[in-house]
Image (tube, helix red, strand yellow):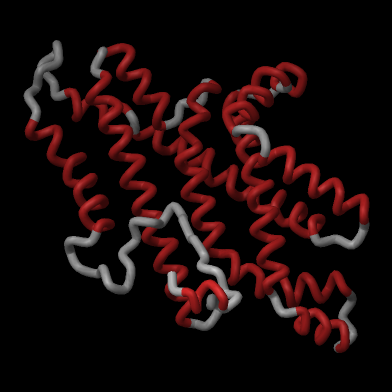
Amino acid sequence: MSGDGINSGNPARINVTDGSLIPQKGERGSLSAWNISFFGAVGLLIALPFITPNNMEDGSNPYMKVLAFVPDGLVATFGVTVASICCALVIGLFAGLGRISHVTIINRIATIYVEVVRGIPLLVQLFYIYYALGPVLHLEGPTAAILAMSVCYGAYMAEIFRAGIQAVPKGQMEAALALGLSPSQAMIKVVLPQTIKIILPPIGNEFIALLKDSSLVSILAVSDLLRRGREFASTSFRYFESYTVIALIYLVMTLFFSRLVALMEDRLRHRGTLH
């Protein structure tokens, strides 16, 4: 970094996201990191059943057996992830509005929620809601998993909403109020629509992070992708094959959604929404 950059008052911004393997403008070739990782993982998933011997006791191929065993776990993983991200968006919206509220009690409650939840690891929250609160609230595995992940990621979504709302120029709210809208109407009709466009990329990155963290719900008797892989490994003792397939499937999913997030961000930037 040059001395002019240090003294200019515009510090360098470090941006690390779950889409770090997305090809940049100067890396669009077929040998980009993303292409090698994504198509390499897909190629391995396809090739492994054909290049390994059929050495299971029943004469079948272990990789083919794993691939046939885990599809319902994949459905469960997506179900938990989508339900959790939807609930987290609702929680995050209200908590984010509370974070910028001028009503002291609302602001304090929202701030305490964000700070407390973000200070506790997700795994601990899963255990607490399932084992400590589960018997009291009569929560089953999937319900407890969705509740814990919604509460956890709702705190992170709250900060995204807060930052997005504050990124909208104050003149937008002032203009809406000058036109006769109430503060709540101005927020709903003017500020929030602009906020959504700003926060779509970080929400996409949180979805990817949530998809990966959904593997933790396997400890709550949820038959997700990882739990199905563990069940196959425990019955067949094919741990290497089982976890290799699970890791490759997670890698393909996260890289695929990372690419979608990057494409969405590029489209928004070209439309002038992002700067």
Q: Who is closer to the viewer here, 156 or 8?
A: 8
Where residue 10 sits, quadrant-wise, is bottom right
Q: Position of residue 267 (x, y in %)?
A: 44, 75
Residue reaching furthest to the right: 104
On the rendered image, what quadrant is the N terminus found in? bottom left
Question: In the picture shown, does residue 251 fall above or below 49?
Answer: below
Question: In the picture shown, does residue 224 fall above or below 271?
Answer: above
Q: Position of residue 143 (x, y in %)?
A: 63, 31
Q: Tell me which residue sits at (56%, 76%) in the image.
A: 7
Q: Who is closer to the viewer here, 57 or 151?
A: 151
Q: Tell me which residue sits at (64%, 49%) in the image.
A: 156
Q: Who is closer to the viewer here, 264 or 112?
A: 112
Residue reaching furthest to the front: 3
Q: Position of residue 274 (x, y in %)?
A: 54, 76
Q: Position of residue 247 (x, y in %)?
A: 32, 35
Question: In the picture shown, does residue 29 fall above or below 52?
Answer: below
229 relative to 51 in the view: left or right: right
